[in-house]
Image (spheres, rainbow, N blue to C red):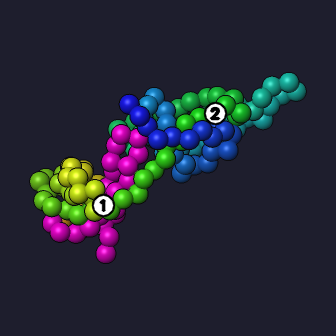
């Protein structure tokens, strides 16, 4: 599968950044960097939580290692219909229709006809907010 990512050095990551671990887009929640010894390299211990599966992943790697960072596309869609906690939406530019899970914090705000902001991250689409 083709995924849009860019490479970045793990030592430059901060909490709140996004990273690809196990082919899943994750949000970094915690980073600890151990200072190197005389001949060693700094080690980075990073905790990240999957954006889609909410699974916690912990990795330890040298600070100069390159990691994949997902490129996030921010797009707008209109809600066509709602069934349970899933909204059927139409992308405002491509007119493609698809289902988006309605996040807990947006329930009650997402109604038919509203526009929502969604992100495309790797192969996933995530609803982020209702546009006023």
In percent of width and height, residue 15 lies at 57, 49
Residue drawn 20% across the image and 62% down it: 79
Q: Which mark is residue 59?
A: none
Q: Picture quarter containing residue 63?
A: top right
Main SS, magenta residues: strand
Quadrant housing the C terminus: bottom left
For residue 12, side relative to residue 77 (left or right): right
Residue 14 appears in view: yes
Q: Nearer the viewer, residue 101 or 56?
A: 101
Circle 1 residues within 10 Å: few <14, some 14–19, many ≥20: few
Please say whether residue 130 is one of the residues in the magenta stretch: yes
Q: Which residues are magenta?
A: 112-132
Quadrant housing the N terminus: top left
Residue drawn 43% across the image and 37% down it: 3
Label 1: state its secondary structure: loop
In primary-sequence order, the first of circles 2 and 1 is 2
Q: Picture quarter containing residue 12?
A: top right
In percent of width and height, residue 91 lies at 26, 58
Asked if the residues shown at circle 2 and circle 1 are in contact, with their CB atoms under 8 angstroms apart, the answer is: no
């Amino acid at each position: 599968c083709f995924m849009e990512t860019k490479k970045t050095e793990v030592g430059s990551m901060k909490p709140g950044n996004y990273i690809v671990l196990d082919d899943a887009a994750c949000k970094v929640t915690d980073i600890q960097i151990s200072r190197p010894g005389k001949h060693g390299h700094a080690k980075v211990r990073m905790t990240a939580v999957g954006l889609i599966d909410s699974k916690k992943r912990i990795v330890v790697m040298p600070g100069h290692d390159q990691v994949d960072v997902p490129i996030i596309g921010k797009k707008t869609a209109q809600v066509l219909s709602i069934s349970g906690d899933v909204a059927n939406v139409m992308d405002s530019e491509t007119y493609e229709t698809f289902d988006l899970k309605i996040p807990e914090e947006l329930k009650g705000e997402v109604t038919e006809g509203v526009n929502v902001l969604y992100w495309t991250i790797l192969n996933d689409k995530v609803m982020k907010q209702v546009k006023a």
